[in-house]
Image (cartoon, coloured by chain):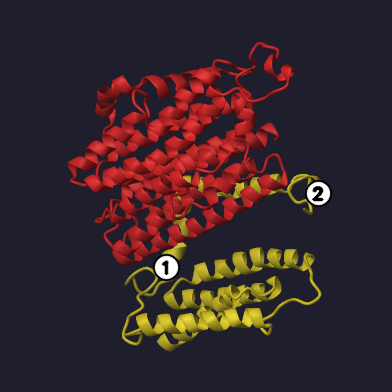
Chain colours: A yellow, B red
């Protein structure tokens, strides 16, 4: 099981390197999909299955899909992937940096215990993340209202920033 | 901007700071700061000119980076200590990371580069909100961290005082000068934070009063450049008396109010046997005094060339509300004799 987690984390770091090396947004979004996918796997391995499912649904299925459609509207004929030299050299640099950090800080990787998502509660249907959501609807009601207001505020902010299309903030200058 | 969305954004600005003030959990504190960032973005971009959009974009990038670092530091602290309380940061790594993230949020040196450029792109009212209200929530969090080692606060503070003074030297744009003045005053505030939190509270309150009065004076005549500042003597002559006094108060000259925080801070630093630090801070604030003096010189002590129509404008009834300007100007100029009373009012 630990080896599964380490493979997933390895994929996570490589995916982050792929995004950070600044390719064209299509490929960066692909990197984000990979990172989110293996991140969900890490979450499942740590016991947060509900959170992992929510991440898949909302992040990948909501936000990243919207981002992919927006990136498709800004299409370019020759998108820069990881084969082009500027992106490749950044990627090589980041991999070397990760290697250096691993060499300095990575001692004892095989003897650490990961711990669970919610401590040492044990196996049950009601894990920490599910209970957290239900608490947010009961005694954490104000946080729910606050969270809802923040989401509505984000919508207002985006609508206000894009008001007027080419006469507003989005004009081509 | 449409009134409904405008009030929603202003209410959200209030909500964000209130949430940060009222929270003991890192997540809620971070959430309040994010609400503040989100709510001010359309306010900064409201006139839709490219310079304002550029300022908004820069502000968003910087604040997003700082928020991400803050969240990371809060989560690392929770991982290491097992609890989410803001006041319990025993590990130097997490407390330093939190301090640096919050320093980037408020524009302390060496994380200050965004401040003048962002302030330059905004209108004066939004710049006022940026320099006063947006500083409150991060400063409250910095106050609550209480690290073991004051060295990082001293380093940030002294660097900010020097950079705030030195950076404003060659500026002719008033908003950039106000940005550098903000950097310098926040430097004084964070310098004393680890030694005497009541003095830090005093510094930030006096700074908010002084900068409010200066911004209001500039908003009255709508000046943003030294050139237009120098021709305001004909429009509102009383400002040629009050604005230099406000500027000298910002520079920290007795017998004006701005001397009060600097005086108390130097006294406290001396009591802590940090005399070289006190000397360096006092000498570095002479840089800021130089450009405040230059502004006073341009406004009051010179009469620049102007066409005759500009020297005798119509004196119409003022349409604006003069109460905030009057109150803050009076408190900027006259509050120094009340130092003992004010010091006894600072609780913590």
Residue at 60 percent of width and 74 percent of height: A19
Between B271 and A75, the one nearer to me in the picture: B271
Indicate left or right for B190 with B307 as reference: left
Relative to residue B258, is residue B239 depicted above or below?
A: above
The spot of residue A26 in percent (x, y) is 70, 73
Q: Chain of mark 2?
A: A
Quadrant showing the N terminus of chain B: top right
Instruction: Kindly indicate the quadrant of the structure image that contains residue B311.
Output: top right
Within 10 Å of disc 1 (Cα), the crowding (few <14, some 14-19, many 20+) is some
Crowd class of label 2 (few under 14; some 14 to 19; many from 20; radius 10 Å): few
Name the mark nearer the viewer: 1 or 2. 2
x and y, in percent, of residue B236 in the image: 60, 17
- In what element is the residue under mark 2? helix
Front one among A31 and A132: A31
Mark positioned earlier in the residue sequence (1 or 2): 1
Residue annotated with mark 1: A127
Q: Secondary structure at mark 1?
A: loop
Q: Quadrant of the C terminus of chain B?
A: top left
Nearer to us in this view, A101 or B156: B156
Residue at the disc numbered 2: A166
Q: Is residue B313 left or right of residue A116?
A: right
Residue B241 rendering spot, x and y as whole percentages = 50, 18
Considering only vertical position in the picture, is A154 above or below B47? Answer: below
Is residue A60 depicted above or below B135 in this figure?
A: below
On the question of residue B236 being in view, the answer is yes
**Residue toward you, A90 or A146:** A90
Q: Label 1 marks which chain's residue?
A: A
Question: Residue at position x 34%, y 87% from top?
Answer: A110
């Amino acid at each position: 099981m630990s080896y599964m987690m380490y493979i997933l984390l390895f994929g996570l770091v490589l995916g982050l390197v792929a995004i950070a090396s600044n390719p064209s947004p299509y490929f960066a979004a692909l990197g984000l999909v990979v990172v989110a996918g293996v991140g969900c796997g890490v979450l499942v391995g740590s016991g947060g299955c509900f959170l992992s499912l929510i991440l898949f649904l909302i992040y990948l299925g909501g936000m990243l899909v919207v981002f992919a459609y927006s990136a498709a509207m800004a299409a370019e004929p020759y998108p820069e992937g990881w084969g082009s030299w500027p992106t490749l050299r950044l990627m090589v640099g980041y991999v070397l940096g990760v290697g250096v950090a691993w060499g300095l800080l990575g001692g004892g990787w095989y003897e650490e215990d990961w711990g669970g998502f919610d401590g040492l509660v044990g196996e049950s249907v009601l894990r920490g993340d599910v209970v957290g959501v239900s608490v947010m609807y009961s005694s954490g009601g104000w946080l729910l209202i606050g969270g809802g207001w923040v989401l509505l505020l984000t919508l207002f902010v985006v609508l206000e920033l894009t008001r007027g299309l080419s006469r507003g903030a989005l004009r081509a200058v | 901007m449409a009134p409904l969305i405008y009030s929603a954004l202003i209410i959200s600005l209030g909500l964000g700071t209130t949430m940060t003030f009222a929270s003991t959990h890192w997540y809620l504190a971070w959430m309040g700061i994010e609400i503040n960032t989100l709510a001010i973005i359309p306010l900064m971009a409201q006139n839709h000119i490219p310079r304002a959009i550029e300022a908004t974009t820069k502000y968003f990038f910087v604040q997003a980076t700082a928020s991400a670092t803050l969240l990371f530091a809060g989560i690392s602290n929770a991982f290491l200590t097992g609890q989410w309380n803001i006041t319990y940061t025993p590990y130097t790594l997490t407390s330093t990371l939190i301090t640096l993230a919050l320093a980037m949020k408020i524009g302390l040196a060496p994380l200050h580069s965004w401040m003048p450029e962002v302030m330059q792109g905004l209108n004066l009212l939004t710049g006022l909100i940026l320099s006063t209200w947006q500083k409150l929530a991060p400063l409250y969090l910095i106050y609550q961290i209480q690290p073991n080692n004051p060295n990082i606060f001293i380093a940030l503070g002294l660097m900010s005082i020097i950079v705030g003074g030195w950076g404003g030297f060659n500026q002719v744009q008033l908003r950039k000068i106000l940005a550098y003045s903000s950097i310098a005053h926040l430097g004084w505030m964070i310098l004393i934070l680890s030694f005497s939190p009541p003095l830090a509270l005093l510094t930030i309150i006096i700074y908010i009063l002084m900068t409010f009065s200066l911004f209001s004076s500039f908003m009255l005549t709508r000046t943003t450049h030294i050139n237009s500042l120098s021709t305001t003597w004909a429009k509102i002559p009383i400002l040629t008396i009050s604005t230099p006094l406000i500027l000298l108060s910002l520079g920290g000259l007795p017998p004006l109010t701005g001397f009060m925080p600097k005086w108390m801070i130097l006294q406290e630093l001396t009591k802590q046997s940090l005399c070289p630090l006190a000397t360096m801070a006092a000498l570095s604030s002479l840089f800021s005094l130089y450009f405040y003096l230059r502004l006073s010189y341009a406004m009051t002590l010179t009469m620049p060339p102007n066409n005759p129509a500009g020297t005798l404008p119509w004196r119409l009834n003022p349409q604006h509300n003069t109460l905030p300007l009057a109150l803050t100007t009076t408190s900027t100029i006259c509050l120094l004799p009340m130092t003992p009373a004010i010091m006894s009012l600072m609780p913590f």
